[in-house]
Amino acid sequence: MASTATIHTTTQAGQLRYPGTRRVDRQPATGHLFYVAVTNTGDYQVYRSTNKGVSWAAFGAARTAEAAIVEMGGFFVDWQNRLYLTYRTNVSGQDRIWMQAGVITASNVSWHSPLRLAAAANDGTPGSYFSGMAPLVVRYPDGRSVGFVAVGHQGGTSMAVRVYGFAIPAVGQPVASNTVRNKVLWFFDEPAGGHQVPAVGYELSPAHAWVAWGRTYLWTVKLTWNGSGWTGPNTAVRLTPQGTDIPAPPAVDSVAGVWRNPGWLVAQPYQYDTTQVIVWERNQGNTRTASFITPAHPAGVVKHCTLSYNNVTRDFRVYAVGTSNPDLHYIDYSVAGAAWSGWSTVSTTDVAGIDNYSVRRESFGSARYDVLYQNGAASPWTVTHVSQDLTYAPFTPAWRFGEGGNNLDANGRAWDTTRDLDLRWTFDDPDTADTQSAWAISRQIGTGALAYLRASDSTWQAAEVKNVGATPARTLPGFFWGLTSDPNHSYRVKVWDSTDAASVYSAALVVVPSGKVNPTVTSPTPSQVITQDSVTVTWTAAEQTAWRVRLKILAETVYDSGWRAGTDTSHTPDLALGDGFNYGAVVETRNAEGLGSDEQQVIFSVDFVEPATATVTLTPLPQQGIIRAAITNPAPVGAQPAVARQELYRRAILNPYIVDHDFETADMSGWAAPYAGAAVRTNTRAHKGSWSYQLTSDGTDALGSHVQTVLIPCTANVTYYLDMWATASVLKNTFAQIRWYDGGGTFVAVSDGIGKPPPAANAWDYRWAVGTAPGNATHMRLCAVLDSVPAAGDVMWVDEVRVRVNDPSQGVRIASGLPSGAVFDDWQAASGVAYEYRVQVRGVNNATVGGVWTA
């Protein structure tokens, strides 16, 4: 099937001369077709079709070259929407070769500056030195392009082809560049004179390039890609045999070539019988040449030809006009059948000249060949596009997995028979714009007979059922699609495209029908209070081949064992539980068929007394190459347990402190008025040094009293870490808090630390808070809060208030099992690196407390 459309009319007699020149291309990103014409005044105009050639329209305004275009050369559209064209002008007695590139936008082409690649005197006869042109381009992912234009030379005493390199930066204008090195010019032994258009093509990964040229005897070279350009070989390969007993081929004005993996195809009229066309294929290694000779053309002698190829089947198609009538014919070579079809006409409309047509280089992306020809008896002529549709089956569908919902995560998985089963597949067609029109699904249970799903009533039939529908998915309802006693189910899918061409059936999707076996969590028990910083989760299960344990705080998972094979029914998560938190212990198991159970969750709480927070004093001893860390463990107060053992951690300092208040100076300018109380700097109590900040609550707010800094600049979406030491005259909660504000000083959010009372009245304890600045936050306040309905006269003291950008690293553990008051020499610290250290203390009650990072 073919469709025909008029693109435009023209007074240019040879608008599409020469057949080897590629004048039509497809934009990969959109599937749109593009063609560039020479206008009646010698300018150039881009035309576009957005519907596969059904209709065409001028795309943007015509563009003026430096002078009237004498010859339009090859044309190319790359994967990143950049368009490249070449043309020749005649200015000041010179043949001039130009490359013009531009970016395709929604409404036009945003052109770069034109780049003149070559100029040579033509003795007043345009085209007497340079003739045809063919561009080749490689585009990098970052937007850069490198390429060359192969140009036919016919001046002097012999013929030649030369490549002219260029480069286009990601941002900027094209420049001439030595993209081809070693050799760029190849002569061939034909007398000077006569037109020639070279052919170019390139491989993928890596982008080795091919160039073919000649008028009677054809030659070719392979240019090796070197990562930034190409290396030209010293010698060329002759494709056409030559000898005293071999007839010379007829001269052609252009060479048609195309890369068809894994070979380089070049066509010309056959020298032994000029009613035939011979296609040369040079292998990828450039070591041997094969040939394919068409049957005789129905219109007699062939003067010019071109070719394209089917990127799905690798078949190729030759186009030619004979001399007995001006109809454009084509013929296909079948790779699978190793044979030619018969010649057919593209159209019965006469071509205006035997060399006035052009063909897109391949069928890729649209499942069709695109042919342009000029027709009409006299000016104005018409440029016509013919879309030659190809009909072949969609690609074999593949099953889709892991899309959530009721879709399997992989082939061969067990599935709960009470749950819906979503079967999802791909529809992929050589024509990327094609769509699915129908589908069929087969099912085989164990080794039983095949059955086919009838969508209208969701029943299974003995014969294939073609179900009309474009959706590449089908849901089989739970409780109906299978039984737990069934052997494995095997499903296969087949699809039809919009032309009613059918794919083959897919590979089998194997589903194991199964039923869930849920475990029972036996420990911890619901609402149990854990009095240490670890928990052992135990469970029972009637059937189990794998298990998974998680700990959650609200909806956030804070520990995940991952799936582990085996029949274990007990696991102790490697996580220090936080005092005062509620956790969910979640257990999942898999049955003998691998089907996962439902989540079984038990909520428990943690309430333990932490040991006293340790501090560390650091003494660098450079002559010994160590940093000495002396740990101070305060004596336990109240219910605090004694130290059982402790660990020392080290990390490099990434972020300096933004605020560091120890109140040892009288400057309190960084602090704002307190809330619900009175505050004063005092030397009656201090954690470090002699001074601290004292808040006396006035009892006016049951939600608490607090001291607060002035507004401090912060960066949105950055996480900050606030820490301090606090104590109180009463056993009421104290905690650290970050309050966030927008640019107008309006409060927007708060980040609270854990609140708890001091271990004893007037005993110091460490407090901290971590918070991420909201997206609209520009400032923050650092607060220390006295909570739990403070009464008038309740007092809180704070000291060593610090904040910085958070470093989530827990550091490297450099010592463990240390006793209370230990001294440790760190000899592994690197010279010149600023470090900080902390101590993690474990009490005799198996409760731990993290330390204070100290430099």
Image: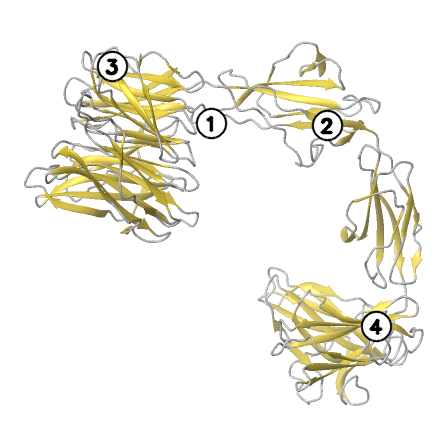
Q: For mark 4, what is the residue?
A: 646
Q: CA distance from mark 3 to mark 2?
A: 56 Å
Badge 3 amino acid: Thr
Q: Is residue 574 rendered to the left or right of residue 467?
A: right
Q: Is residue 230 rendered to the left or right of residue 156?
A: right
Image coordinates for residue 536, horizontal then vertical, percent: 89, 54
- What secondary structure is marked by label 3? loop
Residues tagged 3 and 2 counted as in contact (Cβ below 8 A): no
- Can residue 48 be seen here? The reply is no
Of labels 2 and 4, earlier in sequence is: 2
Q: For mark 2, what is the residue?
A: 421
- What secondary structure is marked by label 4? strand
Q: For mark 1, what is the residue?
A: 433
Of circles 1 and 4, the one toward us is 4
Of labels 1 and 2, earlier in sequence is: 2
Instruction: Relative to 800, say whether 415 is above or below.
Output: above
Observer-nearest residue: 312 or 36? 312
- Can residue 123 be seen here? The reply is yes
Image coordinates for residue 236, horizontal then vertical, percent: 26, 38
Badge 2 amino acid: Leu
Image coordinates for residue 441, horizontal then vertical, percent: 65, 19
